[in-house]
Image (cartoon, helix red, strand yellow):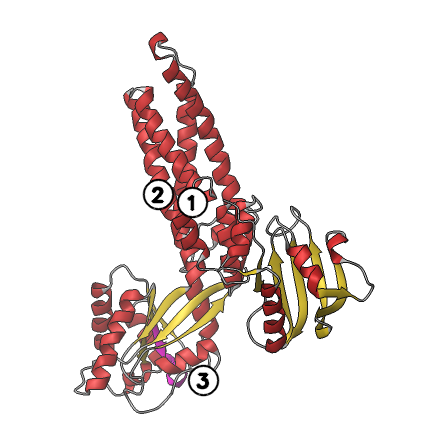
């Protein structure tokens, strides 16, 4: 049921700033605002045209709280589809609180988390996947996540799903019609065309499901763990990648006792780098806890960087053999994880030593974290682990776990229908699976909802959105 009351909330971040925006939405938004706003031109804003801005004062009992700008948006031509007022006031926390408290006294209610966007959905201004994209857009912190959220908010994903649902619904109607004439043994739905449609739907669903892998990376970033023996330059590499002194660098082995994390955006893709404690045999209880956490972080990582100190080639006769043994250990323990083998401090090596390492250690890449040599090439190697083809081609990419789950269930039902069609299953049994597939399509766009689902989705929004 669409709520009838008028809600208010701060639409800008809390705290002091240059300006703040207080948003109202509901049937009485114009009436309530006109009770506290005095236009410098003397106009009554409740009678003014939509999409106009008015200068004036917020007043109660001849007390002026602030000089403000009031923007008017009459429904249905507003974000929520209702009458909306936005008050742009000075950013003092005191002024914000005074105006909101005044509006509450005049009959407004404080908005719940995401209630403005919820009302936009209930009033048909956005479908559910577009509404969820609003939260993703606000949370986007790199070019790729912003691009995907914008595409979804513009309806790219929901349009594709809605089209498939409509075509399936047309055939479902014909199948249902056949059930009404079951005694006459007639077929209204062309089975060949129906099979072709199911093939096409299955293809699109599989593509969307596969896109979730890159979508999840875009939304959450790729965790990259930097591992190696103590004092090989892991913290120096992290600092070089981030171009700042994020981690403590010391000649003392075992300086990093805990994991250090930070994020870097490379060509629009977020990478979360995790600098771990050095892996070695130790009696130090605190350091051993750090080493245990290192292996836990490797478990969570999508990419592992194994860093070695190439200067040890001068002091350890079995240096190359030891490296290859450690590499095999990591590969055997984590066979599914991409592994980058990086030789650090290569600026101090002779050309002969470099050639020996490149020949003796498969796929090793030489850098100097301290001199920032090879860092840009390393970034390119990391980016190569991400399939950005779909992003470059502006294809629909699924980033939402709820959508992913519904797509998997819809695919399962479509495959059941295909099997039934090939096996000569009766129309009434096929109709059950078709209805279920339509249900899962509707879950994505919001044509099928319940209060619990909406509550879970919009609870994650900020109050003013």
Q: How crowded is mark 1: few (under 14 residues within 10 Å), some or many (20 or more)?
A: many
Give the residue pinned by disc 1.
208
Foreground mark, 1 or 3? 1
Residue extent of the magenta highlight: 342-352
Q: Quadrant of residue 253?
A: bottom left
Give the mark, 1 or 2, whose residue is nearer the N terminus. 1
Q: In which quarter of the image is the C terminus?
A: bottom right
Total numbered badges shown on the rendered structure: 3
Under circle 1, the secondary element is helix
Foreground mark, 1 or 2? 2
Residue 416 percent location from the top left of the image: 31, 31
- Residue at 76 percent of width and 52 percent of height: 47
Q: Is residue 318 left or right of residue 388?
A: left
Assess whether mark 3 and mark 1 are in contact (beta carbons under 8 angstroms). no
Q: Quadrant of residue 30?
A: bottom right
Residue 428 percent location from the top left of the image: 32, 21
Residue 460 percent location from the top left of the image: 44, 60
Residue 149 can be seen in this image: no
Q: Residue 245 carries which label?
A: 3
């Amino acid at each position: 049921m669409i709520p009838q009351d008028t809600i208010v909330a701060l639409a800008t971040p809390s705290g002091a700033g240059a300006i703040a925006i207080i948003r109202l939405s509901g049937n009485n938004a114009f009436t309530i605002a006109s009770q506290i706003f005095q236009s410098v031109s003397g106009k009554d804003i409740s009678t003014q045209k939509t999409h106009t801005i008015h200068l004036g004062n917020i007043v109660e009992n001849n007390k002026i709280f602030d000089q403000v700008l009031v923007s008017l948006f009459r429904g249905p031509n507003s974000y929520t589809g209702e009458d909306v007022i936005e008050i742009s006031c000075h950013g003092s926390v005191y002024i914000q609180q005074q105006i909101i408290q005044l509006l509450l006294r005049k009959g407004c209610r404080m908005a719940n988390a995401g209630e403005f966007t919820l009302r936009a959905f209930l009033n048909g201004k956005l479908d559910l996947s577009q509404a969820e994209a609003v939260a993703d857009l606000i949370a986007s912190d790199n070019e790729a996540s912003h691009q995907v959220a914008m595409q979804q908010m513009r309806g790219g994903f929901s349009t594709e799903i809605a089209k498939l649902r409509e075509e399936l619904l047309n055939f479902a109607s014909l199948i249902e019609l056949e059930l009404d004439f079951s005694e006459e043994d007639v077929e209204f739905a062309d089975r060949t065309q129906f099979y072709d449609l199911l093939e096409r739907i299955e293809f699109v669903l599989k593509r969307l499901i596969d896109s979730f892998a890159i979508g999840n990376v875009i939304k959450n970033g790729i965790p990259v763990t930097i591992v190696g023996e103590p004092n090989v330059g892991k913290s120096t590499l992290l600092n070089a990648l981030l171009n700042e002194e994020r981690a403590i660098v010391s000649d003392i082995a075992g300086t990093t006792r805990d994991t250090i994390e930070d994020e870097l955006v490379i060509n629009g893709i977020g990478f979360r780098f995790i600098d771990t404690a050095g892996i070695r045999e130790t009696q130090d209880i605190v350091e051993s806890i750090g080493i245990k956490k290192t292996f836990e972080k490797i478990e969570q990582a999508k990419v592992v960087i194994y860093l070695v100190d190439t200067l040890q080639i001068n002091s350890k006769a079995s240096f190359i053999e030891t490296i290859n043994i450690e590499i095999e250990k990591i590969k055997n323990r984590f066979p599914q994880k991409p592994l980058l083998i990086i030789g650090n401090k290569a600026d101090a090596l002779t050309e002969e030593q470099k050639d020996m390492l490149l020949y003796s250690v498969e796929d090793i890449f030489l850098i100097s974290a301290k001199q920032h040599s090879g860092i840009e090439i390393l970034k390119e190697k990391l980016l190569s682990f991400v399939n950005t083809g779909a992003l470059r081609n502006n294809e629909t990419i699924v980033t939402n776990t709820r959508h992913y789950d519904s797509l998997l269930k819809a695919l399962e039902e479509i495959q059941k229908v295909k099997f039934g069609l090939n096996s000569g299953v009766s129309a009434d049994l096929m109709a059950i699976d078709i209805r279920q597939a339509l249900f899962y399509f509707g879950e994505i766009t919001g044509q099928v909802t319940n209060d619990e689902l909406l509550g879970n989705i919009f609870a994650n929004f900020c109050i003013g959105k």
